[in-house]
Amino acid sequence: MRYSICVIDDKIPASGVEGIRDSDLLNASNLQMMLRQETLWTDEVIKNLVRTLLEQKDADNVTSKWDVYGFTNPSFFINTLDSGLIRFDIVIFDWEYPGTGSGAGIDPENILKEILEKTFCLVFIFSGADKEQAIKNILAKPEFQEYKERLEYLNKNVSGADQTDTLLRKAEEMYRELITKHHCEGGTTAAISN
């Protein structure tokens, strides 16, 4: 099964590539172009995640396993979501953006809540260990409890090891569980994939 996945992370180096606007939806071709310019990337984990998503094949070993998209800013994601042009099965959401916590930047808690309210997708918060406890405290709040089946925090690095494979394996498992549960309740997968 082919999943639509969106990586939202300010470390995607879209502003450094001619012909790509960092405020636009980044498609697989845009992301591949950026990967060819390896020196643009400042975050090896995000670079590896994007590369892995683009390279993984379905069971036929020919078809791409993922329809891969990206945004450098969660506000751009929300704007695209509001336009109704595209929906995603899985969102990988970075927690930190310039100005976060200063009151002048992006409020990841509010953006996360908005994503969860407007979609039925799985959301993975893929961030560093320095934010783990703060993120877990936020996810424990009552307003996030109704989304706990499709919301997960995953540390980008555990003991210095890239967690890309763990994230993708967990995403597939959660997605299958959600579809199975929804089918058992008499729903359809269309409702799950937005």
Image (cartoon, grey):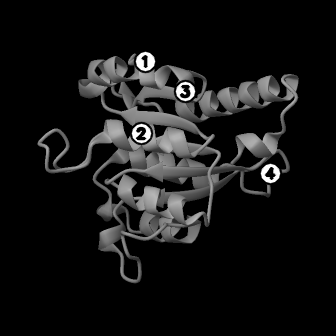
- The amino acid at mark 4 is Asn
Which is nearer the N-term, disc 4 or disc 2?
A: 4
Q: Which residue is mark 4?
A: 61
Residue 164 showing in the rendered view:
no
Label number found at residue 142: 1
Query: In the image, what residue occupies the spot 66% across and 49% down?
Result: 56
State the residue at coordinates (36%, 82%).
18
Q: Residue at x 84, y 23 (%)?
A: 185
Q: Residue at x 85, y 29 (%)?
A: 183
Mark toward the viewer: 2 or 1: 1
Give the structural element (helix, strand or loop) at label 2.
Answer: helix
Q: Position of residue 132 (x, y in %)?
A: 31, 22
Element type where label 1 sits in the image:
helix
Which tag, 2 or 3, sits closer to the chain's start?
Answer: 2
Numbered label attached to residue 179: none
N-terminal of the pair, mark 3 or mark 4, is: 4
Residue that numbered label 3 is attached to? 147
Q: Spatial distance from mark 4 to mark 1, Cα to Cα?
A: 43 Å
Circle nearer the viewer, 4 or 1 = 1
- For disc 3, the neighbor class at 10 Å (few under 14, some 14 to 19, many from 20) is some
Q: Nearer the viewer, mark 3 or mark 4?
A: 3
Point out residue 101 in the picture as x, y percentages from the top left corner: 16, 38
